[in-house]
Image (cartoon, rainbow, N blue to C red):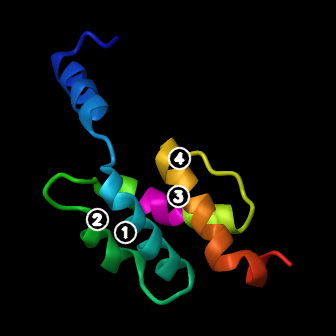
Amino acid sequence: MPRNPAAIERQKIKRKMKIPLDLIPIAYDISKNVYEGKLKISERVKLLVGANRMNGGSARDYFYNFRYLMQGKKFSRTLNADSMNYFFENFLKDYWKSQWP
């Protein structure tokens, strides 16, 4: 544990920041549209950020992780279990026939 008071405060804030469950479907839909080239990341981050619901880095993580998952690539930024479940369930609904014969 860091001894620096500022670092300790940042850790406390980081632990408190969780992605609200109601943002997961929104993050998926936006990520899908970014992946399909219908939207630009920079335009859509603002939809998930605001009122301290999600920070910009986390929003971008959703967009990039969506793409990596669709491409079957490894990614290092984590998504919570609820997000992963939602993404996988909807990949099957949205892309099963077109992406994976």
Spatial CA distance of label 2 from label 3 is 17 Å
Q: Amino acid at mark 1?
A: Ile
Q: Amino acid at mark 3?
A: Tyr
Between residues 1 and 66, which one lies in front from this camera angle? 66
Q: Look at mark 3 in the image and give the residue it sits on.
A: 86
Q: Which mark is residue 26?
A: 1
Q: Earlier in the sequence, mark 4 or mark 1?
A: 1
Do residues under tags 4 and 3 come within 8 Å of each other at their CB atoms? Answer: no
In the image: residue 21, left or right of residue 38: left
Is residue 78 visible in this depiction of the protein?
no
| Mark 3 secondary-structure assignment | helix
Spatial CA distance of label 4 from label 3 is 17 Å
Magenta range is: 60-64
Spatial CA distance of label 1 from label 3 is 11 Å
Extreme-left residue of the structure? 51
Q: Amino acid at mark 2?
A: Leu
26, above or below 19, in the image: below
Q: Is residue 63 magenta?
A: yes
Q: Which mark is residue 77?
A: 4
> Quadrant of the rendered structure where residue 54 is?
bottom left
